[in-house]
Image: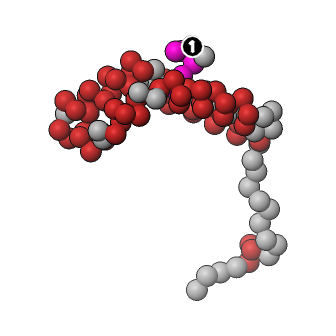
Amino acid sequence: MSQVDTPVSPNEQKERFQARLDDPSKHWKFSLGDLEKRKLWDEYMRAFEDALSECSTEASPWHIVPANRKWYRNVVVAEAIAKTLQEMDPQWPEPEAGLSGVVIE
């Protein structure tokens, strides 16, 4: 899997972590444990690949959403949701019969 295929690249993750440390209002988003987990990047990516290959099906596909740029991530997610809803063509349920004469007092 290339760096482009990962949800967030190691470089982007590093920048985000550093931004959290540089801004005291974002310290709550950071844990020292994040540094240890970061060392496991390759293992996380193998698990990511395994999950995609084993769990994504034609009936229930998984999507890789690039997340290095939040605005682009949001566009990709919105497009996937819109496409799925269009394919599903959801409809309002039929109303109960006799509602036109109901008056709420």
Q: Nearer the viewer, residue 8 or 53?
A: 53
Residue 38, given in percent of the width and then of the height, sits at 40, 29
Query: Is there any visible trace of residue 62 in the rendered image?
Result: yes
Q: Is residue 21 magenta?
A: no
Residue 32, given in percent of the width and then of the height, sits at 29, 38
- As drawn, which residue projects farthest toward the bottom? 105
Which quadrant of the structure image shows residue 98? bottom right
Quarter of the picture holding the N terminus: top right
Q: Nearer the viewer, residue 103 or 71?
A: 71
The residue segment tinted magenta is 3-7
Task: Say left or right for 27 vs 33.
Answer: left
Task: Please tell me whether mark 1 sits on a helix, a strand or a loop.
Answer: loop
Most common secondary structure along the magenta stretch? helix
- Please name the residue that numbered disc 1 is placed on: 2
Image: 57 above or below 6: below
Query: Is there any visible trace of residue 79 in the rendered image?
Result: no
Q: Nearer the viewer, residue 43 or 52?
A: 43
Residue 7, given in percent of the width and then of the height, sits at 52, 26
